Image (cartoon, rainbow, N blue to C red):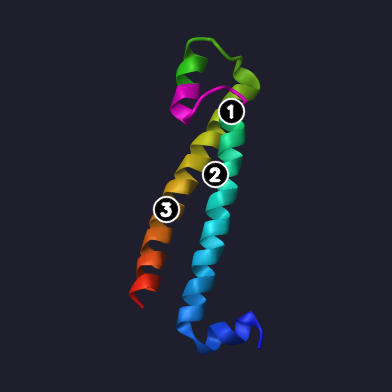
Amino acid sequence: MGIVEEIRQDPLTKLEHEVELLIREFVSNKKELRNVLSAYGVMRAEEMEAKMKKGEFGEHPAYEDYLSALQLEMNLEGLRELLRERYSRLIGA
């Protein structure tokens, strides 16, 4: 039986699969964010913004990287919320 059949037959399997996919997406986004931020020696997008305002980085490509970092941080927050909700359902099942 494949995963699709398992998911159709067992809601818990579907939930486990969702949690697994969310974790993969979270880790992928986290790695990408880490790569962007480490290129500028900062820990958060807001630090990048502050350094850009001080003129420590040129606008290009720092501004585009800043926007990417900001989007990744927002994605991670959304993924955290989804993971909390799905995981609490999973362990409560």
Q: Distance between the residues labelled 3 and 1?
A: 22 Å
Say whether residue 30 is left or right of residue 47: right
Q: Does the magenta stretch include residue 19?
A: no
Q: Name the residue under label 2.
A: 30
Q: Are marks 3 and 1 in contact (CB under 8 Å)?
A: no
Quarter holding residue 35? top right
Label 3 crowd bin: few (<14), some (14–19), many (20+), radius 10 Å = some
For label 3, the residue is 80
Which mark is first along the chain, 3 or 2? Answer: 2
Please tell me the numbered disc located at residue 38.
1
Vertical position of residue 92 compared to residue 38: above or below: below
Query: CA separation, marks 2 and 3?
Result: 11 Å
Instruction: Decide whether the magenta segment is chiefly helix, strand or loop.
Output: loop
Q: In which quarter of the image is the N terminus?
A: bottom right
| 44 magenta-colored | yes
Question: Which quadrant is the C terminus positioned in?
Answer: bottom left
Please tell me which residue is depicted at 60% across the width and 32% down the height of the picture: 36
Q: Where is residue 9 in the image (x, y as percent from the top left)?
A: 52, 89
Quick one: label 3 or label 1, which is nearer the N terminus? Answer: 1
Magenta extent = 39-48
- Mark 1 vs mark 2: which is more N-terminal? 2
The three-letter code of the residue at mark 2 reads Lys
> As displayed, is residue 48 above or below residue 71?
above
